[in-house]
Amino acid sequence: MSMNDEMTKPAHEDDRSDAVTPEPVDESVEVAEEADAPLADDVLIELAEDADGRVGDALRQVLVERDQAREDRLRALAEVRNNQRRAVENERRIERASRAGAYRGVLPVLDQLDMALSQELETISIDQLAEGVRIARDEMAKTLADQGVDRIYPEVGSPFDPVRHEAMLRQEAEGIESDHIVMVMQPGYAMGDQVLRPAKVAVAP
């Protein structure tokens, strides 16, 4: 073959040698997938009716047990939903009762304040007014204590706790070590391990 013949050879002849032959489809896979699919209810019922002897009895028994299992499952799901609904309602009821108890404890404080404000200022002394405020304050402290709220009031000279204390300033004091409390500027409050408000303190440098 001459060079000219090679140059004039059709391009599609080379392309045919590189073409990809499609792989045959395995129909057995599709048949197997169809075989794995569950039979419809009407098919199962028809099979049970057409079957004779022990095979028919077994199929009918299987259908009865299957229907019973479905009913049991639906009943169990309904019971779970009812239990969840009751649990949510109980949580809301307990939360409302807890809030009501806290609000009920505040009412005596309001009564003391109303009583103090209703007095004629000209007829009471400063000491009497201060006594009314003190009674109201004690009632509020008792209400908080009943709800599990404790006062944070660290002793002077005790170590500074960044969780329960808030350092407002650095102040030197004789006999107080570094990072120890020099003065309590405002008490804090905590409910168990949860700090509602840290105590504001001055800390030795």
Image (cartoon, rainbow, N blue to C red):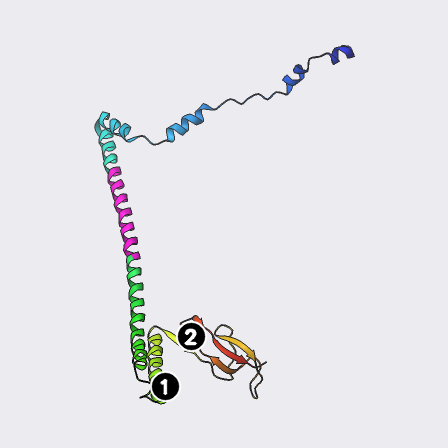
For marks 1 and 2, the one nearer the N-term is: 1
Q: Would you call the spot at circle 1 few (<14 residues within 10 Å), some (14-19), or many (20 or more)?
A: few
Residue 34 higher or lower than 167, as above or below: above
Residue 142 higher or lower than 57, as above or below: below
Main SS category, magenta section:
helix
The label on residue 130 is 1
The label on residue 189 is 2
The residue that appears at 29% across and 74% down in the rendered structure is 107
Q: Quadrant of residue 130?
A: bottom left
Residue 57 higher or lower than 11, as above or below: below
x and y percent of residue 202 in the render?
53, 80
The label on residue 157 is none
**Front one among 33 and 196:** 196
Find the distance from the CA under tag 1 to the CA under tag 2.
Answer: 24 Å
Give the residue type at disc 1.
Ala
The reply to whether discs 1 and 2 touch (Cβ–Cβ < 8 Å) is no
**Magenta includes 83?**
yes
Which mark is in front, 1 or 2? 1
Which residue is at the far right?
Answer: 3
Query: Which quarter of the image is occupied by the C terminus?
Result: bottom right
Q: Which residues fall within the magenta stretch?
A: 65-88
x and y percent of residue 76 in the render?
27, 47
Give the residue type at disc 2.
Tyr
The residue that appears at 39% across and 76% down in the rendered structure is 150
